[in-house]
Image (spheres, rainbow, N blue to C red):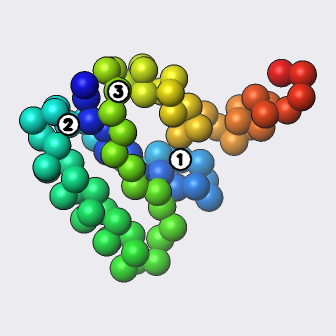
Amino acid sequence: MTIFLLEYEPKTGMIVSLTQYSEHERDAAMKQRLRLEKANALAGREREVALLEAVTESALRATHSRYFKSVKELADAASPGS
């Protein structure tokens, strides 16, 4: 499994950063997640910071598509008849 550290800006629907870590780098990924959360809180930014696991980035994009689709794509997918 690959660990992905994702920083996401909900207001714009944009990924600020996406970093991959191996399973052996789990501690480093967790420490970086905490650093990002603290930096965002101190700066007053409302961003999501998440550690996610997937076999590949393609699999991550499929299972967590809300981070990778535009607002329009998400709205279209949620509308009846799509």
Instruction: Describe the element under mark 1 as helix, strand or loop.
Output: strand
As rendered, which of 71 and 78 lies closer to the eye? Answer: 78
**Residue 24, x across and y down, in percent:** 9, 35
* 32 is higher (above) or lower (below) than 73: below
How far is the residue under mark 2 from the one under mark 3?
Answer: 11 Å
Residue identified by numbered label 3: 54
The foreground one among 14 and 49 is: 49
Q: Residue at coordinates 48% horizontally, 61% vertically from top-left? A: 47
Q: Residue at x 43, y 27 (%)?
A: 60
Amino acid marked by disc 3: Ala
> Is 61 placed above or below 67 here?
above
Is residue 66 in sight in this rendering?
yes
Helix, strand or loop at label 2? It is strand
Q: Where does label 2 land, which residue?
A: 21
User: What type is the residue that disc 1 sits on?
Assistant: Met
How many residues crowd around disc 1 within 10 Å: few (fewer than 14), some, or many (20 or more)? some
Mark 2 and mark 3 lie on one chain; the one further toward the N terminus is 2
Label 3 neighbour load within 10 Å: few <14, some 14-19, many 20+: some
Residue 34, position in %: x, y?
27, 63
Q: Which mark is residue 14?
A: 1
Q: Is 12 left or right of 40, judged from the image as shown?
A: right
